[in-house]
Image (cartoon, rainbow, N blue to C red):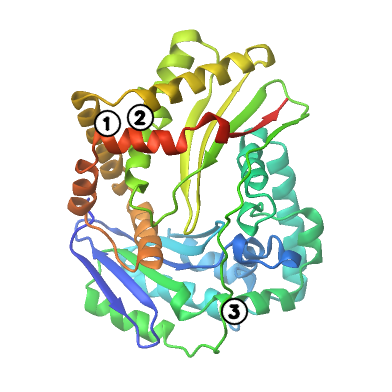
Amino acid sequence: MHVENLNPFTLTNSIRCIHQQVDNSEVSHFGITIKAGSRDENDQEQGLAHYIEHCIFKGTNKRKPFHILSRLDAVGGEINAYTTKEETCIYGSFLNVYYERAIELIADIVFNSTFPTHEIQKEKDVIIDEINSYMDSPSEQIFDDFEDQIFNGHPIGRNILGTIESVNSLKKADIESFIKRNYTPDNIAISSVGNIKTAKLIKLCEKYFDREFTKSQGQERFPFVQYVPSHNQLERDTHQVHTMIGNMAYDMHNDKRRALILLNNVLGGQGLNNRLNLNIREKFGLTYSIESNYVPYSDSGVFQVYFSGEKKTNARIVKLIYKELKKFRETKLGVNQLHLAKQQLKGHIALAQENRAGLMLALGKSLLLFDKVDTNQEIFDQIESITSEDVIEIANEIFVEDQFSSLTFI
């Protein structure tokens, strides 16, 4: 599977679409991505974007919840959705013969949901249970709490789920207001990967997405610009200590983004041969779980290292992490090290694209963010252009110890 032979098109109402035709599979994937996430909520709307993602399955002008949930499941397909801080996505996977069924269903729930009062009230209890489950998982909670800490009151730092209090306060009018101002053509991208001709897909999309949109002034996003390093310890009733350290990083549009992705992959990415895993877990056996992550947003970004372990070894692990970061600031990657790092990153990208549902989602997000999708060759060329000088420069911009924040669940 390669990101090649892509077919972009735009509907008459200005919704952007992209399709990759796949002839050798019985399964296809279709989704709609909307630039509307938790950062687009007003102060009194916390948790609303995620709440809407749940509520669109609760009934349309012609379907009850059972009929929505059964429409694809009854023929062996599946429909799903997710919400992030910057987008909402609704998508389905299905046998090729059910392409039209899937497109019609997704268009119906996104644009024709009626949000019956008794159904959306009931869904609050489901989300509150989800919040409670999340609170029972410190290894998940610390990621969101850390971003809330470093973004310090900015909407992008909020937990996607909201709080029990904020979710209980949400009303049908809030849902309708949020959709009106955010679910607009310029905020929507449609993506498809499957066995259908582009010409036929265009006809189906025009048929089911041909609607007029109410003119609405979209809500402007304001970037976070006032970062101040901070350090917090919070008591949690857990057997392990969970720790996060990190710094602000490049946004999604920064030219240095790819080099930081490569650097993060070498330091603590998904490969078992990353520096943190080899030099802390394997060498000393101090932690079962340690990783680094780079999370770019549309106008900001976060670099972070997470680990868990015993309280008595916590300070030593932090010291060892900073030792690894210092190596990157002071020593360039050798020619062979850089070459292997590039090959590994390209391999990870290629493997990820073998998941066609994931590829479909990635195509939609790229179209929404950049109004284009790079081919594999373009991506690989960008990776190959990274120099050891680029890497050490980025390490000295991001891996600066006195600019790091920390959060520990102890």
Mark 1 surroundings: few (<14), some (14-19) or many (≥20) residues within 10 A = some
* Residue ID at (64%, 27%): 242
Reading the image, the residue beneath label 1 is 341
Q: Hey, what amino acid is under mark 3?
A: Arg
Reading the image, the residue beneath label 3 is 181
Where in the figure is residue 5, as x and y percent of width and height?
18, 63
Which mark sits nearer the N-terminus, 2 or 3? Answer: 3
Which mark sits nearer the N-terminus, 1 or 2? Answer: 2
Q: Is residue 164 left or right of residue 201?
A: right
In this picture, is 207 found above or below 389?
below
In this picture, is 36 found above or below 224?
below
SS label for mark 3: helix
Which mark sits nearer the N-terminus, 1 or 3? Answer: 3
Distance of mark 1 from mark 2, alpha carbons? 6 Å
Q: Hey, what amino acid is under mark 1?
A: Ala
Q: Quadrant of the C terminus?
A: top right
In the picture, the disc for residue 266 is 2
Q: Is residue 7 left or right of residue 303?
A: left
Which of pointers 2 and 3 indicates the residue nearer the eye? 2
